[in-house]
Image: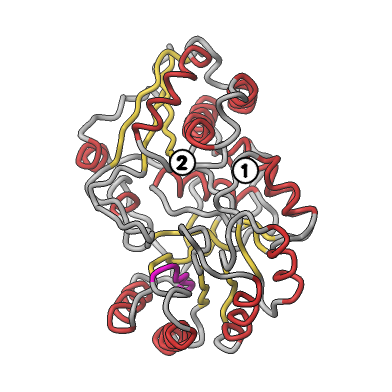
Amino acid sequence: MKITDIRLLPLTGATMDGGWDQGFEAAENLHTLVEVITDEGVTGLGSVYTSATSCAGALGILRPLLLGESAIEPSRVSENLHQSTFWQGRGGAITHFISGIDIALWDIFGKVTGQPISRLLGGRYRNRIKPYGSLLMADPDVLIPRLEGAVQRGFRAIKMGWGPFGRQSREKDELIVRVARETVGPDVELMVDAGGSDRYWPHGYKWALTTADMLVDYDITWFEEALRPDDLAGYIKLTENARLPIASCEVLTRRQAFMPWIEQRAVDYIQPDVTKVGGLTEEFPSTMHAYDHAILFVPHGWNTAVGLAADLQLVAAVPTARWVEYITPAPYIEDLVEQPFSLDEEGCLSIPEAPGLGLAWNAEGVRRFSGMDLTPSDL
């Protein structure tokens, strides 16, 4: 089975506000779906956390390496793309785009073999997982209804991120956390993401450690992105001295970048993003390397239903995974699947067992946000 074409489907019109300092437009294209089409009528779908403009540039470089290649050897094909573009890749748009290709190839591989991706990765340790509803922080009058809405939708774990946290005052930070805990009650897990990868992040180790001490008082499950994303030395100190788990690494790409963070135990929880890191082929070895060092894998997933589907397959295949990220509410998740995701009474999601990514896509939803039709697949 050979690759005959690659199509880009840019998503626009319902792009979620990520809380970035530089601003945001709902019409902005930050997520792009990628179709891989084969000569035997089988197609696979991937997702990339970058614009179609960047993806198109990467595809222009990679297309000659992809056309005619095997469609059922995702790891080898992806590695060949990395090895053949080291002078233009090694991170950024090319690596991000390879993520979408890789996810789509694993989707095809699963369809052809009749197996979910998690089983092809080695086996399923679980059939369900707790999603944490991921939402932006805000002043209490805005934050409270957001939190109440997430609880009403069945989430038993919620992560608040970015917004004014760390950007105004310590008093505001504690007010947000206190109000959040009072709103969701003691039985909902609550996580805090400072958003240290935002531009011009002003804080260092001492702010992070002091803030971590405050968060402990409100039973926060983990503290994410408290420092700039390249501050390895700062994270090592913070993880050693904070009284709650420290999480980071969503901006890293390729498995090699995670090695010093894992081997020097710079974090307690590592957070690769399957739509940026290079796909499942890159992410799965990193998660198992982390597992060998007693570091928990928590996938970063501020993306689409396709990215969430890939994350669900990953957390099924990792022995100690506990959570998966789920933006809430998010049209690029809910409106792109035929059957809506449903949380059980314990706030867990079932992990699909159907072949490949395991989900059926809502063609009308894809058309609404991309203006394009999915290519029919024989499997």
Q: Is residue 42 visible?
A: no
- Name the quarter where the C terminus is drawn: top left
Instruction: Indicate whether residue 162 is drawn in magenta.
Output: yes
The range drawn in magenta is 156-163
Who's the residue at 57% across and 68% down the image?
A: 226
Query: Element under label 2?
Result: loop
Q: Amino acid at mark 2?
A: Gly
Who's the residue at 60% across and 33% down the image?
A: 90
Which disc number belongs to residue 358? 2
Within 10 Å of disc 2 (Cα), the crowding (few <14, some 14-19, many 20+) is many
Query: Element under label 1?
Result: helix
Count of numbered circles on the image = 2
From the top left corner, tell me how far across and down residue 272 is, in percent: 58, 50
Who's the residue at 51% across and 76% down the image?
A: 190
Question: From the viewer's perspective, is residue 66 above or below residue 330?
Answer: above
Q: Which residue is mark 1?
A: 283
Main SS category, magenta section = strand
